[in-house]
Amino acid sequence: MQMLRKIVLAIVALLGTSALADLPVVSAVQTTWGGCAYSIKVLQDVNPIPYPQPFYRIVAESSVLAPETCTVQPQSVEWGTSKLLPQIAIQASADGIVAAYSYGEFIRFMGNFLRVSIRHVDPSTLGTLRVARLVSSVVPPNGGAGALGAVSLGGLTLNGSSVEVTGTFTGNALTEDPAGIPWPYPIWQGNEFIAIYPHFFTSTTSPTLSAPQICSSLPPVLTINGGSTLTLECARGGSYSDPGAQAVDGCGSPMVVHAYNTGADSSGPGPLLSYEGSYTVSYATWNSAGSANASRTVIVDDTTAPSLALLGPSSMVHTCNTPWVDPGEVATDACSGDISTWAGRTGDVNAWAVGVYTLSYTVTDAAGNSATPVTRTVEVVNCPW
């Protein structure tokens, strides 16, 4: 049977009286990539065996839109044929060009048999860098011999490096072609499908096959802007500005997000940037399909060392036999403010003995950050003895 089919197709090709360019175009789709136009066309021919009937040729074409960026040689390549009217789609992204089409025939006593082919297209030659196929079957409840079904192409979408194919099928099972699982195939509920091919352009990973859900029945999705953990530097008198969150319902429409303890709502003061600690900001959204909740942990941390400076000169001359008074120092911390009283001094001055005395000043804030020490030298002179 398979050999006979090949012979018939060969005869049709030989007996065709019209060149491809003269055949009527039944349908066409187009996309652009790199300044070039790429299209799939369905051309209607005539199959004379056993009697004249429509016969379709699936043809890919390329053409130049912008000569400064498109360097391909325009050409036309026939990808395949179908005795049933194909459905076609083509899309392009930064990762490449993907085309999809259905093809098949009517089989006596069985009905329509249609597959869907998904191709990663070589933009230079219109050849195929990767091909994947989908096929449906009728699986009997007892797992016995089944029958072929028909897969109809509904849509083709590129999501980054992933390819999504949607459509409908007859029968009760949908698989890759060839199938990567043994017979009998899992039985589906319904006749709609979504096939997602991850990393389609760089791998041959099998698709995820699933039935679509009605989006209005899906629960909302809540996304925190800026991540679930936010670390901020402690700042005396600083105010917190929350990055917020976003929510969409199952159909992708925006929803209202309720925020708690942001400092801008009535539920709490929000994270206090003047005090180290861990604070929680919460978000929630809900509708008839469900609810979504999330929280952000805001960590206020003091990692900045305080500043320390001397009051008065760093080098002093003091006359002997009179008490020496330290002018002092000033220390400031971004989190705690004025911490001059926390400063310490090592060393002393004997105002009744000639000599040079060195004093060292230090300070450490509540978080353990230490300022760079500063020093002062005091020279005692002119003792009368």
Image (cartoon, grey):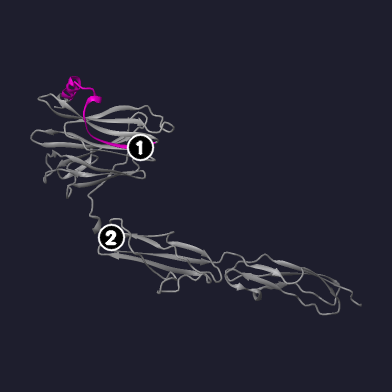
Q: Nearer the viewer, mark 2 or mark 1?
A: 1
What amino acid is at disc 2? Pro
Question: From what the image shows, is residue 87 above or below residue 292?
Answer: above
Residue 377 % position (x, y): 79, 68
In the image, 321 versus 24, the foreground residue is: 24
Residue 347 in which image quadrant: bottom right
Q: Which mark is residue 32?
A: 1
317 relative to 115 in the view: left or right: right
Q: Which residue is mark 2?
A: 219
Quarter placement of the N terminus: top left
For the residue labelled by badge 2, is the local secondary structure a helix, a strand or a loop? loop
At x 28%, y 56%, the residue is 251
Q: Is residue 105 visible?
A: yes
Q: Residues within 10 Å of mark 1 (few under 14, many from 20)?
A: some
In the image, 51 versus 366, the foreground residue is: 51
Residue 90 % position (x, y): 29, 38
210 relative to 343 in the view: left or right: left
The magenta segment: 6-33
Q: Is residue 182 visible?
A: no
Looking at this view, name the residue that lies furthest to the right: 385
What amino acid is at disc 1? Thr
61 relative to 300 in the view: left or right: left
Residue 76 % position (x, y): 30, 27
Residue 18 colored magenta? yes
